[in-house]
Amino acid sequence: MTERKNRGRAIIFFLVAVISACILIRLGDADDSPGLGGIGILLAMILAMRGIYHIHVIPRGYHIPIILLILAVIALAFPIVLYIDGEIWGFSQMAAISLSAGAVMILIAVMRIVRVRRGR
């Protein structure tokens, strides 16, 4: 019974993730606000990870490090994409903050994965 209940919860989380991402991306496109689309994608990713948590696909303790690794990749890629797009010139302080935040998130995620593997 609990397995069916967990599958139902996972389906609900996946549906809410898709619906919220579609709505926020559409609103962001209508207002020419790419940040709103980014928030929609991040919200969908977090809701999908919560759905994955309910169906026990990923072992316990690995969900937060996976989310941190995904956010770290975004934080590392963001200033590079802005530089290539011509939005920023040179190396700005915001790029340094984003790159260092991405590096710190990767470090924290790796430390959490090591801790989970050791059994703490």
Image (tube, grey):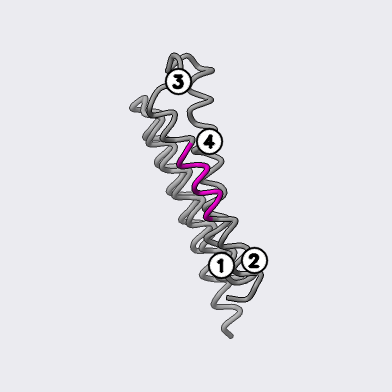
Q: Give the foreground label among 3 and 2.
A: 3
How far is disc 1 from disc 4 in space, using C-alphas? 26 Å
Q: Is residue 20 above or below residue 56?
A: above
Q: Are marks 4 and 2 in contact (CB under 8 Å)?
A: no
Quarter where residue 101 is shown: top left
Disc 3 designates what residue? 91
Quadrant containing the N terminus in the rendered view: bottom right
Distance of mark 3 from mark 1, alpha carbons? 39 Å
Amino acid type at mark 1: Tyr
How far apart are labels 3 and 2 at the CA level? Answer: 38 Å
Which numbered disc, 1 or 4, marks the residue that appears first in the sequence? 1
Q: In the picture, residue 35 is in which quadrant?
A: top left
**Residue tagged 1:** 53
Which span of residues is magenta-colored?
Answer: 100-108
Q: Which residue is mark 4?
A: 76
> Residue at horizontal 49%, vertical 47%?
104
Q: Residue 87 or 95: which is nearer the viewer?
A: 95
Q: Which residue type does callout 3 highlight?
A: Phe
Image location (x, y in percent) of residue 119: 62, 76
**Residue 58 shows which numbered tag?**
2
